[in-house]
Image: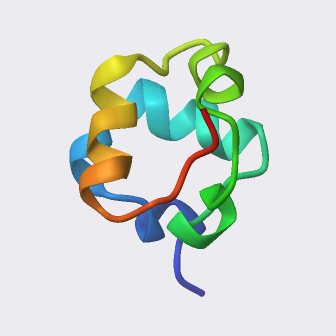
Amino acid sequence: MSDPVAQLPTNLGRPATRAFEAAGYRSLADLEGASEQELLALHGVGPRAIKILRERGVALAP
């Protein structure tokens, strides 16, 4: 069985990856439409992670 976290970009960093996993986001598709503010409120997620998601084409709500 593959690790669901592996579907997230590896350059996000472990704190952001763990935060996304804990919140139920296991792939880029899961993050589509999520609020940028909601994601930034997760412990371990910062502006760099948001930038990486946008560079990967994830459409985030403002």
Which residue is at a point 60% across and 12% down the rendered structure image? Answer: 43
Residue 59 at what x, y percent from top left? 51, 58
Q: In the displayed structure, would residue 28 be above or below residue 18?
A: below
Farthest bottom residue in view: 1
Q: In the displayed structure, would residue 61 be above or below residue 2?
A: above
Q: Is residue 44 left or right of residue 62?
A: left
Whether residue 42 is visible here, answered yes or no, is yes
Q: In the displayed structure, would residue 3 be above or below residue 22?
A: below
- Tell me the quarter of the image containing the C terminus: top right
Which residue is at a point 41% across and 16% down the rendered structure image? Answer: 46
Farthest front residue in view: 62
Residue 4 at what x, y percent from top left? 58, 69
Q: Is residue 26 left or right of residue 58?
A: right
Residue 7 at what x, y percent from top left? 45, 70
Quadrant for residue 39, please give it.
Answer: top right
Which residue is at a point 48% across and 40% down the rendered structure image? Answer: 17
Q: Nearer the viewer, residue 34 or 12?
A: 34
Q: Nearer the viewer, residue 17 or 36?
A: 36
Quadrant for residue 52, please give it.
Answer: top left
- Tell me the quarter of the image containing the N terminus: bottom right
Whether residue 13 is visible here, answered yes or no, is no
